[in-house]
Amino acid sequence: MSLDSIPSDLREAIEGDLDPVRPLHPAWVRTMLAVAILVVVLAFVLAKASLRPDMDQLPIWLSWGCSILQLALGVLLIGLALREAVPGEGIPGGAVRIAAITALAVQILVGIATSIYSPAITMPGSGIAPGIGCLKHETAMALPTFVVTLWLVFRALPLRAPTAGLLGGAGATVASDAVIHLLCPMSNLTHVFVWHTGALILFMALGWFAGTIWERLRWRQTS
Amino acid sequence: MAVDRRAEEQQLTALMIAYQKGDMDAFTGLYEALKRPLIRYLWTFVRNQTMAEDLLQETFLQLHRARQTYPPPRPVRPWIYAITRHVALMHLRSMRRRKEVLPDEDLPEVPVPPEMDQLADRATVQRLLGTLPRTAQEVLILHHLLGMSFEEVGAIIGIAPGTAKVRAHRALKKIREQMIEEDA
């Protein structure tokens, strides 16, 4: 193959499909689209549901303060996922690990702090039924943002698609947990770790899995 | 040197924007400007000139499929090199699956920058470069041969700029040590 000119088959392939394309918006603009969905879902839930009964016992930094922190962290994670989806703007592996660990750590620490300030709130029974209820709520709240985030990620070209999916899953769930934290009346740690942290891990794994599938489909034609 | 680099980047950005608008001449311009450095970069993965040339074609096809994902007016080269790297890695993965082995070839002829030219004669530097592990070689080539900043190198490879700097430093140190050993 001569390097002096474009090979004829490459030229034909390009000339056959040279329609103008609209460039991708910057990551922050795409993040705002995912955040808009998130805000609509969370505002709807907050308007319809009643706040946890022990809100008065929790200091403001732990109730609304931690919710705002989790929301900000969720938006940041979604932004990182969308940035990771653009070639040449990849996030260092260490930063990805820190982001994933921070998402888990913040959720766990908020759960522990809540159980310290309001340890008496528990539900009767084995906890499976309320746990499944919380998982359903968390899933229903995280899913729209998760789907929109992954759609935006896969419309671009994530070169580490599983990583981008994991960050998107973490972002959607952490942001949803910001509101769940204000609604769920149970503060015992088993419930928090199994059902709420479990939901976070589940969505991170789903994002990773979706990324793996997308990557296989997108690159299967490469030699 | 810095001015040339900026002018070159501006030219690539202009070509990329025109290419996104459907200009075939702009694609040709990009191909002409990038084919040799990309071949050089692809060689670090496959160490075979023919395969690197085949992968160059695959790279440009992938660039074409993904051309809307370039967000102007960001620098073009990190975007292109990141895709190039991915094409090469996917190819290596596929080769490993098929248990294929390609014969190693000498590094293709490329301009060697002054800081590396000072170390030894060009042939020695090129030979020693070829003995480095791929990760070290990749950073050296992107930074020292292709003139990218460590921030750009980090963004292409997915590592922190500081890590890229450390890798480049260690690789240069290793080349120096090998030269001293050979002299002794």
Image: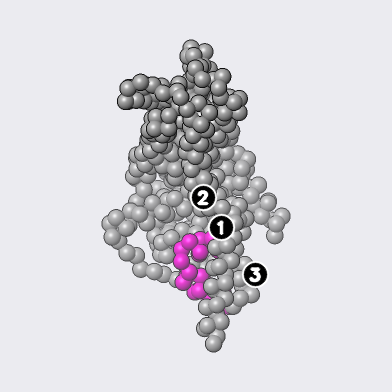
Viewer-closest of A196 and A16: A196
Which of the chains bears the disc numbered 3? Answer: B
Callout 2 secondary element: helix
Q: Indicate the chain on which mark 1 is placed.
A: B
The structure residue drawn at horizontal position 34% and vertical position 51%, both measured from the top left corner, is A223
State how far apart marks 3 and 1 are (Cα): 23 Å
Looking at the picture, tell me which residue is in the foreground, B4 or A44: A44
Q: Is residue B150 left or right of residue B47?
A: right
Q: Is residue B146 visible?
A: no
Question: Which disc number belongs to residue B98?
Answer: none
Q: Position of residue A159 (x, y in %)?
A: 45, 45
- Please state, as top left, top right, bottom left or bottom right, where the N terminus of chain B lies in the image: bottom right
- On screen, residue B68 above or below B180: above
Amino acid on which the number 1 mark rests in the picture: Thr
Q: Does mark 3 fall on the same chain as mark 2?
A: no
Among numbered discs 3 and 1, the one appearing first in the sequence: 3
Do marks 1 and 2 share a chain? no
Identify the residue position indicated by label 3 in the image: B114
Who's the residue at 60% across and 39% down the image?
A: B72
Tell me if label 1 and label 2 are in contact, CB under 8 Å: yes
Residue stretch in magenta: B121-143
Residue B34 is situated, as x and y percent measured from the top left of the image, at: 54, 54
Between label 2 and label 3, give the one nearer the viewer.
2
Q: Secondary structure at mark 1?
A: helix
Disc 3, SS:
helix
Assign the C terminus of chain B to one quadrant of the image: bottom right
Q: CA distance from mark 1 to mark 2?
A: 10 Å
Decide whether the magenta segment is chiefly helix, strand or loop.
helix
The residue wearing badge 2 is A94
Q: Are marks 3 and 1 on the same chain?
A: yes
Q: Is residue A77 above or below residue A141?
A: below
Numbered mark located on residue B163 in the image: 1
